């Protein structure tokens, strides 16, 4: 599978048809996905119809930024004609969605072709995509390991080059964790940047949606196609699009970049620290900063997630608990019991941390940290040791992502591969609404040769 | 709060929310709640200036 920007150029130039590209993608999915379980539905008929429509539009003179680019969406996005599973068995018999989610519509308008829906942790409450109902999504670099989650299907499908682009959601790290473990690029934009309309919610206060891609130019092209205000999502900022594709060429001269120390160093294994070392070396970063109250930000995100998530699914917790994911249903119950005073305090802490981090961004432009404490762990693993402490693995994979999303900062994850080792990524973090800076620094890492998406052996 | 207090809270709060737990579930929920308490304690105990609001609209 070639890069999205190359496919779009070829389809726009009519040297390749969207239909031929789509047929090849569907064949690759049919051939390889049984080894990965990244798709929960393949929308073959729809994909072929969308591809024919793209070819017709191009023949009529239109030029489309994602012309004929196959992609797939985490199965919490509404896809007209399919029930929106959000990873849950209790959703399997819901009526089919009548309309596409806003982002799915934007992809179609940009000429992209939907090939299917992707696996995830039930209701997005997990970092491993070990789903009791729809299967464990496997890491294309080592199928005995997890792909990360909760957008695990979105990570694995792109890493295996079944599609060059996917859509995911990120409440506490669910785009960034699979991007890191699968060795691909991912964007968690600023809170409120992209419309969540038609994406099944998990935690209203923290939910973000965004793209994953096998290359940085593809990630930028996809993000640019997704941007724009949407009155249907009350949390979506009414801002005009701020495209980043051109920003990737601007370089990093004059940017003040620092490595996040303290909390972020403490919660990493040696391979994660080495990835940050390589990124800082490539960028010439020698400065370190601490994120104010990182541990409290993580605690606030944890409490807000438990409380809002538990409240949202209270009826299922009362009436259909035996049909829920065994790995998360007890956590959902515990979350539903959190006293309101703790939740309110967590929301105030969130505002307080945000104010402190705004101060930090007066003096620095971009922060670098590992995206996950470790590379991909084995399927079924329950514990991880960090800084001499034995911690539950499934919750701890988000330790480095949670404090950042708690206050809605934009992050690009860039893979920092090393031959013979499992991939791992770094977070490139900027001030709110400055996705352009994340992309400029990621582009510098790509230009240095330090960052690229490694091709797994089973890639299509 | 000790484990017995947490278990008593879980029982009462579940009754209030209309959730009936089997014995094995109850033990796991108590564990999870104890973990939430550990993580939340520094947050609960933090003194914040009165001016820090729960923003009705969150602007990062």
Image (tube, coloured by chain):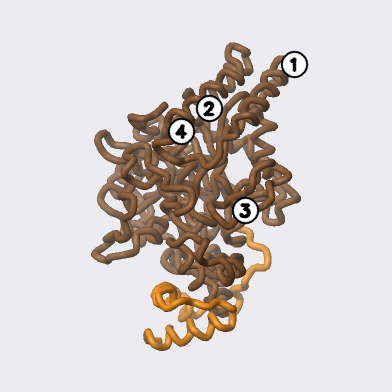
Q: Which residue is mark 1?
A: A60
Structural distance between the alpha carbons of marks 2 and 4: 18 Å
Residue A443 % position (x, y): 45, 34
Structural distance between the alpha carbons of marks 3 and 4: 25 Å
> How crowded is the residue under tag 3: few (<14 C-alpha within 10 Å), some, or many (20+)?
some
Question: Which chain is home to disc 3?
Answer: A
Dot 2: what SS? Answer: helix
Dot 1: what SS? Answer: loop
Residue B4 % position (x, y): 39, 87
Chain B's colour?
orange
- Residue for point 46% across, 35% down: A158
Question: Which chain is home to disc 4?
Answer: A
Q: Which residue is mark 3?
A: A200
**Is there CB contact under 8 Å for labels 3 and 2?**
no
Residue A74 % position (x, y): 55, 44
> How crowded is the residue under tag 4: few (<14 C-alpha within 10 Å), some, or many (20+)?
many
Q: Which residue is mark 2?
A: A26
Seen in the picture, residue A39 relative to A9 is either above or below; the reply is: below
- Residue for point 49% across, 59% down: A125
Residue A178 % position (x, y): 43, 46
Q: Which chain is brown?
A: A
Q: From the viewer's perspective, tell me whether residue A97 is left or right of residue A451.
A: right
Q: Which residue is mark 4?
A: A214
Question: Which chain is home to disc 2?
Answer: A
Q: Earlier in the sequence, mark 3 or mark 2?
A: 2
User: In the image shown, does A263 or A362 lie closer to the viewer?
Assistant: A263
Q: Nearer the viewer, mark 3 or mark 2?
A: 2
> How crowded is the residue under tag 1: few (<14 C-alpha within 10 Å), some, or many (20+)?
few
């Amino acid at each position: 599978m070639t890069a999205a920007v190359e496919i779009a150029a070829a389809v726009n130039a009519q040297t390749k048809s969207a239909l031929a590209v789509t047929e090849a993608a569907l064949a690759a999915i049919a051939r390889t996905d049984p080894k990965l379980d990244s798709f929960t539905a393949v929308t073959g008929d729809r994909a072929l119809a969308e591809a024919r429509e793209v070819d017709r539009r191009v023949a009529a003179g239109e030029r489309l930024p994602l012309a004929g680019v196959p992609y797939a969406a985490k199965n919490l996005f509404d896809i007209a004609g399919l029930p929106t599973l959000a990873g849950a068995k209790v959703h399997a018999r819901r009526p089919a969605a009548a309309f596409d989610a806003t982002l799915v519509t934007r992809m179609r308008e940009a000429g992209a072709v939907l090939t299917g829906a992707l696996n995830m942790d039930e209701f997005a409450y997990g970092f491993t995509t070990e789903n009791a109902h729809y299967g464990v999504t496997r890491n294309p670099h080592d199928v005995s390991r997890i792909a990360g989650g909760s957008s695990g299907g979105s990570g694995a499908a792109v890493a295996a080059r079944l599609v060059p682009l996917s859509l995911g959601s990120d409440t506490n790290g669910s785009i960034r964790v699979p991007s890191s473990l699968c060795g691909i690029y991912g964007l968690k934009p600023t809170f409120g940047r992209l419309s969540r309309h038609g994406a099944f919610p998990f935690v209203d206060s923290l939910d973000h949606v965004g793209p994953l891609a096998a290359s940085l130019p593809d990630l930028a092209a996809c993000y640019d196609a997704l941007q724009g205000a949407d009155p249907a999502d009350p949390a979506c900022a009414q801002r005009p699009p701020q495209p980043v594709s051109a920003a990737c060429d601007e370089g990093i001269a004059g940017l003040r970049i620092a490595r996040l120390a303290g909390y972020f160093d403490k919660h990493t294994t040696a391979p994660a620290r080495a990835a940050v070392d390589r990124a800082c070396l490539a960028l010439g970063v020698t400065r370190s900063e601490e994120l104010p109250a990182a541990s409290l930000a993580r605690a606030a995100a944890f409490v807000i997630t438990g409380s809002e998530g538990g409240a949202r699914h209270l009826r299922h917790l009362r009436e259909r608990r035996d049909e829920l994911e065994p790995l998360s249903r007890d956590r959902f119950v515990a979350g539903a019991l959190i006293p309101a005073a703790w939740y309110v305090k967590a929301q105030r802490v969130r505002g307080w941390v945000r104010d402190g981090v705004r101060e930090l961004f007066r003096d620095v432009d971009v922060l670098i940290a590992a995206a996950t404490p470790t590379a991909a762990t084995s399927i079924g693993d329950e514990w991880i040791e960090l800084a001499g402490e034995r911690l539950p693995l499934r919750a701890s994979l988000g330790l480095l992502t949670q404090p950042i999303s708690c206050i809605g900062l934009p992050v690009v994850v860039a893979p920092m591969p090393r031959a013979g080792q499992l991939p791992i990524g770094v977070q490139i973090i900027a001030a709110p609404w400055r996705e352009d800076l994340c992309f400029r620094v990621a582009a510098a890492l790509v230009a240095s040769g330090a960052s690229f998406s490694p091709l797994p052996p089973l890639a299509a | 709060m000790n484990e017995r207090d947490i278990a008593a809270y879980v029982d009462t709060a579940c009754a209030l929310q209309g959730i009936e737990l089997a014995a094995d579930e109850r033990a796991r929920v108590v564990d999870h709640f104890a973990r939430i308490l550990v993580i939340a304690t520094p947050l609960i105990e933090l003194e914040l200036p009165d001016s820090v609001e729960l923003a009705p609209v969150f602007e990062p």
